[in-house]
Image (cartoon, rainbow, N blue to C red):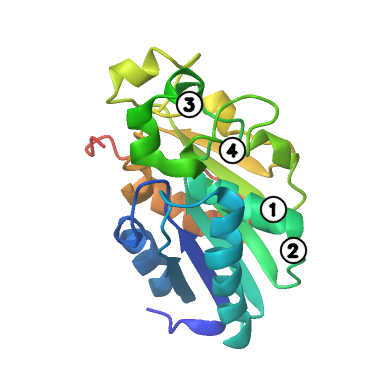
Amino acid sequence: MSTPSPADQVILIHGLARSAKTMEPMAKALQQAGHKTMILDYPSRHKTIPALVDEHLAPAVLACQKDGAQTIHFVTHSMGGILVRDYLSRHKLPELGRVVMLAPPNQGSEVVDRIGDWRAFKAVNGPAGEHLGTAKTSAPRALGPVTYPVGIIAGDRSINPINSRMIEGTDDGKVSIENTKVEGMTDHIVIHRTHPMIMKGKDAIALTLRFIQKGTFAPAVIPNKGEHR
């Protein structure tokens, strides 16, 4: 096992209504590969996306810089990818390395289009969740293309048939494969995973490591069909 170096750091960002714990298996694998990691634990349900970026993500990046990071990568799940896009649209980051997004709603989710105004949805997902729809003015779509190395891992398995009926095309129960894509992305791959658990899959972890280290998912890793998440 390599000793993590402060020169090469990875910030991991969980999704909406999740916690840092969900990113621990990914962080452990990155550490074993020699990357120093920081899991950003932030109140995803209680603030807008710009506020989450300014009050939580920006200070995390600054902490890595003060720690001596020469390269800063990002690994995100779901809305975490939108936070990174928002941050990089408003900040220059000379140390930027590569970004891996797992199941990101880069073009928004039709689920939010359908039920984003419901009181129950707002209670669970907060102000950030309300702005993850597919309208051109939504938070993800208003950010435009990416201009840095981005690898996207999408899932094609859903355990939420109610949500899937609201989504056009193959989906992971929250977002369609098509809507995970963003203009300017470097690579994109689909694995047989669900939205809530994609970040814990052995295949997702192996692919993430490969993109962080090589800038590509090729050669593709065959999903472990013995896992059902």
Pointer 1 local density, CA inside 10 Å: few below 14, some 14–19, many at least 20: some
Q: Nearer the viewer, residue 90 or 156?
A: 90
The residue that disc 1 covers is 149
In what element is the residue under mark 1?
Answer: loop
Alpha carbon distance from label 2 to label 3: 28 Å
In the image, residue 119 above or below residue 102: above
Dividing the picture into quarters, in which one does residue 157 lie? top left
**In the image, residue 141 lies at what x, y percent?**
67, 34
In what element is the residue under mark 4?
Answer: strand
Q: Which residue appears at 73% of the width and 68% of the height?
A: 93
In what element is the residue under mark 2?
Answer: loop
Q: Which residue appears at 32% of the width and 30% of the height?
A: 120
Number of the label disc, if any, that sits on residue 188: 4
- The amino acid sitting under disc 3 is Val
Q: Which residue appears at 49% of the width and 15% of the height?
A: 169
Alpha carbon distance from label 4 to label 1: 11 Å
The residue that disc 2 covers is 91
Alpha carbon distance from label 4 to label 2: 25 Å
Q: Do residues under tags 4 and 3 come within 8 Å of each other at their CB atoms?
A: no
